[in-house]
Protein backbone atom coordinates (compact mmCIF):
# COMPACT_ATOMS: atom_id res chain seq x y z
CA UNK A 1 0.00 0.00 0.00
CA UNK A 2 1.49 3.16 -1.07
CA UNK A 3 2.34 5.69 1.50
CA UNK A 4 0.21 8.75 1.66
CA UNK A 5 1.41 12.24 2.35
CA UNK A 6 -0.51 14.69 4.19
CA UNK A 7 -0.91 18.07 2.76
CA UNK A 8 1.00 20.66 4.58
CA UNK A 9 -0.96 23.48 2.95
CA UNK A 10 -3.42 25.35 5.15
CA UNK A 11 -6.91 25.54 3.91
CA UNK A 12 -7.95 28.75 2.25
CA UNK A 13 -11.01 30.55 3.44
CA UNK A 14 -14.06 29.37 1.66
CA UNK A 15 -17.09 31.40 0.86
CA UNK A 16 -19.18 28.61 2.21
CA UNK A 17 -18.68 26.63 5.34
CA UNK A 18 -15.77 24.17 4.99
CA UNK A 19 -16.11 20.44 5.40
CA UNK A 20 -14.13 18.26 7.83
CA UNK A 21 -13.21 15.80 5.12
CA UNK A 22 -9.63 15.84 3.77
CA UNK A 23 -8.63 14.98 0.21
CA UNK A 24 -5.61 12.66 -0.04
CA UNK A 25 -3.37 12.69 -3.03
CA UNK A 26 -1.73 9.43 -4.25
CA UNK A 27 1.15 8.86 -6.61
CA UNK A 28 -1.25 7.86 -9.23
CA UNK A 29 -2.82 11.14 -9.01
CA UNK A 30 0.53 12.83 -9.39
CA UNK A 31 1.07 11.15 -12.70
CA UNK A 32 -1.95 12.80 -14.16
CA UNK A 33 -1.46 15.94 -16.08
CA UNK A 34 -2.03 18.94 -13.96
CA UNK A 35 -4.37 21.67 -15.07
CA UNK A 36 -3.89 25.14 -14.00
CA UNK A 37 -5.81 26.05 -10.90
CA UNK A 38 -8.58 28.52 -11.27
CA UNK A 39 -8.48 31.45 -8.96
CA UNK A 40 -11.12 31.08 -6.39
CA UNK A 41 -13.53 33.92 -5.87
CA UNK A 42 -12.98 35.71 -2.69
CA UNK A 43 -15.89 36.69 -0.60
CA UNK A 44 -16.80 40.29 -1.33
CA UNK A 45 -18.26 40.66 2.11
CA UNK A 46 -16.12 42.51 4.60
CA UNK A 47 -14.63 40.40 7.27
CA UNK A 48 -16.41 40.59 10.48
CA UNK A 49 -14.60 42.45 13.16
CA UNK A 50 -13.99 40.47 16.20
CA UNK A 51 -13.47 43.61 18.36
CA UNK A 52 -16.20 44.34 20.88
CA UNK A 53 -18.24 47.53 20.25
CA UNK A 54 -17.38 50.43 22.48
CA UNK A 55 -19.96 51.50 25.00
CA UNK A 56 -21.01 55.19 24.90
CA UNK A 57 -19.55 57.41 27.56
CA UNK A 58 -22.02 58.18 30.29
CA UNK A 59 -21.44 60.98 32.85
CA UNK A 60 -21.97 60.33 36.53
CA UNK A 61 -25.61 60.14 37.60
CA UNK A 62 -25.34 63.26 39.75
CA UNK A 63 -24.37 65.32 36.69
CA UNK A 64 -27.31 64.18 34.55
CA UNK A 65 -30.13 66.79 34.22
CA UNK A 66 -33.45 65.38 33.27
CA UNK A 67 -35.78 67.67 31.22
CA UNK A 68 -39.39 66.73 31.64
CA UNK A 69 -42.45 67.86 29.70
CA UNK A 70 -43.48 70.20 32.58
CA UNK A 71 -40.33 72.21 32.08
CA UNK A 72 -41.09 72.41 28.36
CA UNK A 73 -44.53 73.79 29.10
CA UNK A 74 -43.05 76.22 31.62
CA UNK A 75 -40.52 77.37 29.03
CA UNK A 76 -43.27 77.85 26.47
CA UNK A 77 -45.45 79.71 28.99
CA UNK A 78 -42.71 82.17 29.94
CA UNK A 79 -42.66 83.56 26.39
CA UNK A 80 -46.18 85.12 26.42
CA UNK A 81 -45.74 86.19 30.06
CA UNK A 82 -42.67 88.17 29.09
CA UNK A 83 -44.65 89.83 26.29
CA UNK A 84 -47.46 90.76 28.70
CA UNK A 85 -45.01 92.17 31.23
CA UNK A 86 -43.39 94.29 28.55
CA UNK A 87 -46.81 95.57 27.49
CA UNK A 88 -47.69 96.45 31.10
CA UNK A 89 -44.43 98.30 31.48
CA UNK A 90 -45.15 100.36 28.39
CA UNK A 91 -48.61 101.21 29.70
CA UNK A 92 -47.23 102.20 33.09
CA UNK A 93 -44.66 104.42 31.44
CA UNK A 94 -47.38 106.06 29.33
CA UNK A 95 -49.58 106.62 32.39
CA UNK A 96 -46.70 108.21 34.23
CA UNK A 97 -46.13 110.63 31.37
CA UNK A 98 -49.83 111.51 31.30
CA UNK A 99 -49.81 112.00 35.06
CA UNK A 100 -46.92 114.43 34.80
CA UNK A 101 -48.73 116.32 32.03
CA UNK A 102 -51.93 116.53 34.08
CA UNK A 103 -50.01 117.87 37.06
CA UNK A 104 -48.50 120.58 34.89
CA UNK A 105 -51.91 121.52 33.49
CA UNK A 106 -53.36 121.64 37.00
CA UNK A 107 -50.58 123.89 38.21
CA UNK A 108 -51.08 126.18 35.22
CA UNK A 109 -54.86 126.35 35.79
CA UNK A 110 -54.40 127.01 39.50
CA UNK A 111 -52.03 129.85 38.71
CA UNK A 112 -54.49 131.40 36.25
CA UNK A 113 -57.33 131.09 38.76
CA UNK A 114 -55.26 132.83 41.41
CA UNK A 115 -54.43 135.65 39.02
CA UNK A 116 -58.10 136.07 38.08
CA UNK A 117 -59.13 136.21 41.73
CA UNK A 118 -56.54 138.88 42.44
CA UNK A 119 -57.69 140.87 39.40
CA UNK A 120 -61.31 140.58 40.51
CA UNK A 121 -60.47 141.83 43.99
CA UNK A 122 -58.58 144.76 42.49
CA UNK A 123 -61.52 145.69 40.27
CA UNK A 124 -63.95 145.44 43.15
CA UNK A 125 -61.75 147.71 45.23
CA UNK A 126 -61.53 150.30 42.43
CA UNK A 127 -65.21 150.22 41.50
CA UNK A 128 -67.16 150.20 44.72
CA UNK A 129 -70.89 150.42 44.14
CA UNK A 130 -72.48 153.70 45.13
CA UNK A 131 -75.31 152.93 47.52
CA UNK A 132 -77.00 156.22 46.64
CA UNK A 133 -77.25 155.23 42.96
CA UNK A 134 -79.72 152.67 41.62
CA UNK A 135 -79.16 151.03 38.25
CA UNK A 136 -82.36 150.39 36.34
CA UNK A 137 -83.05 148.95 32.91
CA UNK A 138 -85.15 151.41 30.91
CA UNK A 139 -86.56 148.62 28.74
CA UNK A 140 -87.98 146.88 31.80
CA UNK A 141 -89.66 150.11 32.95
CA UNK A 142 -91.18 150.95 29.58
CA UNK A 143 -94.36 148.99 30.29
CA UNK A 144 -94.96 151.13 33.39
CA UNK A 145 -93.91 154.47 31.91
CA UNK A 146 -95.71 154.23 28.56
CA UNK A 147 -99.38 154.83 27.91
CA UNK A 148 -101.48 151.77 27.08
CA UNK A 149 -103.37 153.65 24.37
CA UNK A 150 -100.64 155.44 22.40
CA UNK A 151 -97.63 153.41 23.76
CA UNK A 152 -95.69 156.67 24.23
CA UNK A 153 -94.21 158.25 27.34
CA UNK A 154 -96.84 159.52 29.75
CA UNK A 155 -95.49 163.06 30.06
CA UNK A 156 -98.78 164.19 31.68
CA UNK A 157 -100.26 161.07 33.33
CA UNK A 158 -103.78 161.02 34.80
CA UNK A 159 -105.17 158.28 37.00
CA UNK A 160 -108.79 157.16 37.12
CA UNK A 161 -109.83 157.07 40.81
CA UNK A 162 -112.48 154.39 40.29
CA UNK A 163 -110.13 151.68 38.91
CA UNK A 164 -106.58 153.04 39.27
CA UNK A 165 -105.47 152.81 35.63
CA UNK A 166 -103.29 155.60 34.28
CA UNK A 167 -103.24 157.17 30.82
CA UNK A 168 -102.01 160.23 29.00
CA UNK A 169 -104.16 163.37 29.35
CA UNK A 170 -104.60 163.64 25.60
CA UNK A 171 -105.51 159.94 25.24
CA UNK A 172 -108.20 160.19 27.95
CA UNK A 173 -109.63 163.36 26.42
CA UNK A 174 -109.89 161.64 23.03
CA UNK A 175 -111.49 158.58 24.62
CA UNK A 176 -114.07 160.58 26.57
CA UNK A 177 -114.67 162.86 23.56
CA UNK A 178 -115.64 159.86 21.44
CA UNK A 179 -118.14 158.71 24.08
CA UNK A 180 -119.54 162.22 24.43
CA UNK A 181 -119.96 162.66 20.66
CA UNK A 182 -121.91 159.39 20.45
CA UNK A 183 -124.09 160.46 23.40
CA UNK A 184 -124.91 163.83 21.80
CA UNK A 185 -125.77 162.05 18.57
CA UNK A 186 -128.21 159.84 20.44
CA UNK A 187 -129.57 162.82 22.52
CA UNK A 188 -129.63 165.84 20.19
CA UNK A 189 -131.79 167.88 22.61
CA UNK A 190 -129.11 167.74 25.29
CA UNK A 191 -126.93 170.88 25.34
CA UNK A 192 -123.75 170.55 27.41
CA UNK A 193 -123.27 174.31 27.77
CA UNK A 194 -126.82 174.79 29.03
CA UNK A 195 -126.38 171.90 31.45
CA UNK A 196 -123.19 173.46 32.75
CA UNK A 197 -124.92 176.82 33.26
CA UNK A 198 -127.78 175.15 35.14
CA UNK A 199 -125.37 173.34 37.45
CA UNK A 200 -123.56 176.60 38.09
CA UNK A 201 -126.73 178.29 39.25
CA UNK A 202 -127.63 175.36 41.50
CA UNK A 203 -124.21 175.36 43.11
CA UNK A 204 -124.50 179.09 43.73
CA UNK A 205 -127.92 178.55 45.35
CA UNK A 206 -126.59 175.84 47.62
CA UNK A 207 -123.62 178.00 48.59
CA UNK A 208 -126.00 180.82 49.60
CA UNK A 209 -128.22 178.36 51.52
CA UNK A 210 -125.86 176.00 53.43
CA UNK A 211 -128.76 174.23 55.14
CA UNK A 212 -129.68 172.68 51.78
CA UNK A 213 -126.35 170.82 51.66
CA UNK A 214 -127.32 169.22 54.96
CA UNK A 215 -130.41 167.69 53.37
CA UNK A 216 -129.46 164.62 51.33
CA UNK A 217 -133.02 164.16 50.20
CA UNK A 218 -133.04 167.62 48.64
CA UNK A 219 -129.72 166.99 46.87
CA UNK A 220 -130.99 163.70 45.43
CA UNK A 221 -134.15 165.38 44.20
CA UNK A 222 -132.13 168.12 42.47
CA UNK A 223 -129.77 165.53 40.88
CA UNK A 224 -132.71 163.55 39.44
CA UNK A 225 -134.08 166.69 37.90
CA UNK A 226 -130.88 167.33 35.96
CA UNK A 227 -130.59 166.17 32.33
CA UNK A 228 -128.83 162.79 31.66
CA UNK A 229 -125.04 162.67 31.30
CA UNK A 230 -122.75 160.40 29.17
CA UNK A 231 -121.46 157.19 30.80
CA UNK A 232 -117.66 157.15 30.63
CA UNK A 233 -115.67 153.94 31.16
CA UNK A 234 -112.01 152.96 31.59
CA UNK A 235 -110.26 152.13 28.29
CA UNK A 236 -108.65 149.07 29.88
CA UNK A 237 -111.11 147.43 32.26
CA UNK A 238 -114.34 149.19 31.19
CA UNK A 239 -115.05 150.23 34.77
CA UNK A 240 -117.57 153.07 35.01
CA UNK A 241 -115.84 156.41 35.61
CA UNK A 242 -117.92 158.46 38.05
CA UNK A 243 -115.41 161.15 38.98
CA UNK A 244 -112.80 163.23 37.23
CA UNK A 245 -109.33 161.86 36.51
CA UNK A 246 -106.58 163.08 38.82
CA UNK A 247 -103.12 164.09 37.69
CA UNK A 248 -100.41 161.65 38.96
CA UNK A 249 -97.64 164.06 39.93
CA UNK A 250 -95.33 161.37 41.41
CA UNK A 251 -95.46 159.26 38.27
CA UNK A 252 -94.99 162.39 36.18
CA UNK A 253 -91.73 163.18 38.03
CA UNK A 254 -90.45 159.59 37.62
CA UNK A 255 -91.18 159.58 33.89
CA UNK A 256 -89.34 162.84 33.35
CA UNK A 257 -86.34 161.74 35.47
CA UNK A 258 -85.86 158.43 33.65
CA UNK A 259 -86.45 160.05 30.26
CA UNK A 260 -83.78 162.64 30.98
CA UNK A 261 -81.32 159.91 32.02
CA UNK A 262 -82.06 158.11 28.75
CA UNK A 263 -81.44 161.28 26.73
CA UNK A 264 -85.08 162.06 25.98
CA UNK A 265 -86.68 165.50 26.26
CA UNK A 266 -90.27 166.20 27.30
CA UNK A 267 -92.47 167.89 24.69
CA UNK A 268 -93.60 171.47 25.25
CA UNK A 269 -97.12 172.06 26.44
CA UNK A 270 -99.42 173.66 23.86
CA UNK A 271 -100.45 177.23 24.65
CA UNK A 272 -103.84 177.53 26.32
CA UNK A 273 -106.43 179.15 24.11
CA UNK A 274 -108.48 182.14 25.30
CA UNK A 275 -111.69 181.10 26.97
CA UNK A 276 -110.60 177.52 27.45
CA UNK A 277 -111.56 175.78 30.66
CA UNK A 278 -108.99 175.85 33.40
CA UNK A 279 -109.63 172.16 34.11
CA UNK A 280 -109.28 169.73 31.16
CA UNK A 281 -112.26 167.70 32.41
CA UNK A 282 -114.88 170.44 32.84
CA UNK A 283 -116.46 169.60 29.50
CA UNK A 284 -116.92 165.95 30.46
CA UNK A 285 -117.62 165.99 34.19
CA UNK A 286 -119.71 168.94 35.41
CA UNK A 287 -119.13 170.15 38.95
CA UNK A 288 -120.96 168.11 41.52
CA UNK A 289 -123.54 169.69 43.72
CA UNK A 290 -121.83 170.91 46.89
Image (spheres, rainbow, N blue to C red):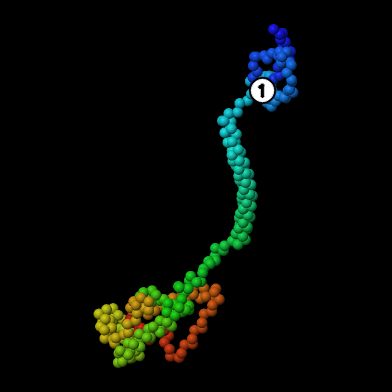
The quadrant in which the N terminus is found is top right
The quadrant in which the C terminus is found is bottom left
Q: Is residue 232 visible?
A: yes
> Where does residue 240 sit, x and y in percent of width and height?
33, 78
> Where does residue 145 sit, x and y in percent of width and height?
46, 74
Closer to the camera, 16 or 290? Answer: 16
**Relative vertical location of residue 22 with respect to residue 120 in this rendering, above or below:** above
* Residue lying at 35% horizontally and 85% vertically, measured from the top left: 179
* Residue lying at 58% horizontally and 36% vertically, measured from the top left: 77
**Relative vertical location of residue 90 with respect to residue 207 in this rendering, above or below:** above
Structural crowding at the residue carrying mark 1, measured as other residues with C-alpha within 10 Å and reported as few (<14), some (14–19) or many (≥20): few
Residue that carries the numbered disc 1 in the rendered image = 15
* Residue lying at 71% horizontally and 8% vertically, measured from the top left: 2
User: Outermost residue toward the top?
Assistant: 1
Closer to the camera, 187 or 217? Answer: 187
Element at badge 1? loop
> Where does residue 173 sit, x and y in percent of width and height?
40, 83
Amino acid sequence: MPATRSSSMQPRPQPFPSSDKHISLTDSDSDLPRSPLRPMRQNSAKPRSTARPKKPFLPPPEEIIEISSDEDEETRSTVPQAHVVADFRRQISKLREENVKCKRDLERASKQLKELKEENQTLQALHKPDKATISLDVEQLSDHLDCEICTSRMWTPYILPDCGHTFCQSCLQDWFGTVQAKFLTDHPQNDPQRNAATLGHLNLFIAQNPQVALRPDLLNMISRSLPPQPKYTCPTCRELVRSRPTEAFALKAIVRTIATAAGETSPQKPARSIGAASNPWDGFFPRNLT
